[in-house]
Image (tube, helix red, strand yellow):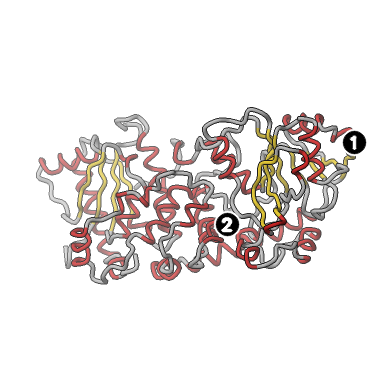
């Protein structure tokens, strides 16, 4: 059982102390920018700039694993940087390490058990104040109405592999922190800041378990709903015929890292004569742009095994397709087939880059 | 054989199944002419997207053929191929396409008769299923 410590400070204070003591050279986390009523993932370097640090915000505007990838892909940080990520961002980050898009050197990973986030639109159209209902749900360990569908069905809301795990469920974002330090790097970090000496060991609350139970039920319901809507070709067409081929889902996807997307490559730009030929042969005619459905099926083959179900894709879909619910369901099936958890153990190779001799007999004849 | 011919796209590995197809031909074995053969250097070259693209563009069936396990020209290619086909089948099944229209077979270079048998068997299965519903769908 992990040991949880009550620390007599909030997240801003923790970041300030880490910067002031020189334990870290930077803190990367969501920051509130009051002048513009915005939140942005920010790398803070000066202790006085930690004001407005809001890693527990009920909104995420991107999966921050993308930003960390951008900052470390070609060159690692030269001094320790504490990054505060949601569990799905952390899993995406660990997945990106396997895809050689992130260098973990000098990263101190801080995460927390995540109550879920609201769709982006609700912030852009609203005022960004923390809804009272959200705070209440976090305190009680329940799902707040209105959070992303995949969040309310997320069973991986407790981070894996973080150096510092903050207990948020059962607490208020303004409370002093409770945290565990499961790794060696985490222990060192805590010691450097004097957190263990000042801290007091506390029992884990039962709210996390309550939420886990609710999430498991929601997950089953979500899978059943999606499977029901995609049971045949008519289902597939009726779900995806609204797609406008903007490919925004892939732009925001943390594990869709290719700079040149296969589905935007010349492989899919047809010459007129081949289109004419197809038009002649197709009984039903052609509706453009072509390969709209194939894009989604194909993207599933590319990243389904690595999908962390963060929900970004669905948030940006202007056509209102439940993309992330579908990818969570189908991706989850692929992962189950290969007994693979994206962002789980760093020792598990990516499913399509490995094999076992004695498996999948049912796939051959 | 009855009615209209079906369209079955076959991705065959250069070293085994394609050679077996060649052998079936030179041995003057008869098999159903519904298949359209594409030669690939290894069954593991068959990206799951190829399979799904064929299905979405109206193929009635997709056959992937490789060397017997342990006999791959590149040692392990067919093990990877099996995982890729598994992904294509899983996605097909979950997304409302018929995974039984995808078949993976290991046929060694010397086994022309087995090649003819697999093609006949698969063609029969596809005939029983009938035309792919994708053909009548403008949206895909």
Q: Residue A306's mark? A: none
Going by the image, does B47 lie left or right of B127? right
| Image quadrant in which the C terminus of chain B is located | bottom left
Residue A214 occupies which quadrant of the picture?
A: bottom right
Q: Residue A311's mark? A: 2
Question: Residue A286's x, y, as percent?
Answer: 28, 68
**Who is closer to the viewer here, B91 or B26?**
B91
Question: Residue B112's x, y, as percent?
Answer: 18, 41
Measure how far apart labels 2 and 1 are at the Cα level: 38 Å
Residue A25 occupies which quadrant of the picture?
A: top right
Chain designation of label 2: A
- Is residue A63 visible in the rendered image? The answer is yes
Q: Residues within 10 Å of mark 2 (few under 14, many from 20)?
A: many
Q: Which of pointers 2 and 1 lies earlier in the amino acid sequence?
A: 1
**Who is closer to the viewer here, A247 or A163?**
A247
Chain designation of label 1: A
Which residue is situated farthest in the front direction here?
Answer: A35
Question: Residue B107's x, y, as percent?
Answer: 26, 40
Question: Compared to B115, does A139 lie above or below?
Answer: below
Going by the image, does B9 lie left or right of A58? left
Q: Residue A198's mark? A: 1
**Who is closer to the viewer here, A254 or A206?**
A254
Going by the image, does A50 lie left or right of B121? right
**Who is closer to the viewer here, B125 or A325?**
A325
Callout 2: helix, strand or loop? Answer: loop
Q: Are marks 2 and 1 in contact (CB under 8 Å)?
A: no
Callout 1: helix, strand or loop? Answer: helix
């Amino acid at each position: 059982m992990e040991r949880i410590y009550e620390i007599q400070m909030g997240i801003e204070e923790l970041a300030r102390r880490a910067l002031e003591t020189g334990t870290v050279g930077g803190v990367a986390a969501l920051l509130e920018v009051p002048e513009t009523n915005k939140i942005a993932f920010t790398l803070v370097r000066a202790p006085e700039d930690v004001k407005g640090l809001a890693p527990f915000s009920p909104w995420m505007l991107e999966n921050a694993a993308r930003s960390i990838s951008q900052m470390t892909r070609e060159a690692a940080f030269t001094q320790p940087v504490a990054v505060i990520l949601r569990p799905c961002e952390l899993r995406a980050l660990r997945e990106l390490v396997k895809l050689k898009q992130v260098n973990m050197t000098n990263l101190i990973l801080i995460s927390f058990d995540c109550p879920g986030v609201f769709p982006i639109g609700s912030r852009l159209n609203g005022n960004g104040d923390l809804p009272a209902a959200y705070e209440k749900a976090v305190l009680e360990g329940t799902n707040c109405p209105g959070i992303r569908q995949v969040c309310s069905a997320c069973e991986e809301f407790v981070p894996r592999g973080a150096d510092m795990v903050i207990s948020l469920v059962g607490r208020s974002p303004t409370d002093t922190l409770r945290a565990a330090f499961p790794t060696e790097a985490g222990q060192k970090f805590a010691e450097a800041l004097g957190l263990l000496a000042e801290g007091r060991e506390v029992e884990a609350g039962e709210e996390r378990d309550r939420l886990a139970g609710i999430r498991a039920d929601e997950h089953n319901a979500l899978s059943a709903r999606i499977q029901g809507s995609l049971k045949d070709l008519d289902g597939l067409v009726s779900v995806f015929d609204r797609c406008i081929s903007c490919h925004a889902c892939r732009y925001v996807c943390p594990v869709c890292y290719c700079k040149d997307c296969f589905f935007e490559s010349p492989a899919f730009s047809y010459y007129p004569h081949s289109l004419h030929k197809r038009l002649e042969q197709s009984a039903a005619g052609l509706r453009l742009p072509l390969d709209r459905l194939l894009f989604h099926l194909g993207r599933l083959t590319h990243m389904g095994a690595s999908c962390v179900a963060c929900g970004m894709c669905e948030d940006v879909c202007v056509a209102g397709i439940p993309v992330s619910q579908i990818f969570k369901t189908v991706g989850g099936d692929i992962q189950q087939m290969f007994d693979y958890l994206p962002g789980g153990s760093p020792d598990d190779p990516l499913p399509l880059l490995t094999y076992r001799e004695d498996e999948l007999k049912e796939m051959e004849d | 054989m009855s009615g209209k011919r079906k369209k079955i796209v076959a991705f065959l590995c250069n070293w085994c199944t394609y050679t077996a197809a060649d052998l079936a031909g030179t041995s003057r074995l008869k098999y159903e002419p519904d298949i359209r053969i594409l030669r690939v250097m290894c069954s593991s070259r068959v990206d799951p997207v190829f399979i799904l693209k064929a299905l979405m563009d109206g193929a009635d069936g997709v056959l992937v053929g490789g060397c017997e396990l342990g006999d791959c020209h590149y040692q392990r290619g067919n093990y990877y191929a099996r995982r890729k086909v598994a992904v294509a089948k899983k996605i097909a099944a979950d997304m409302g396409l018929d995974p039984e229209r995808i078949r993976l077979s290991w046929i060694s270079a010397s086994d022309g008769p087995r090649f003819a048998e697999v093609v006949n068997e698969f063609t029969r299965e596809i005939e029983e299923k009938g035309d792919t519903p994708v053909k009548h769908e403008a949206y895909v």
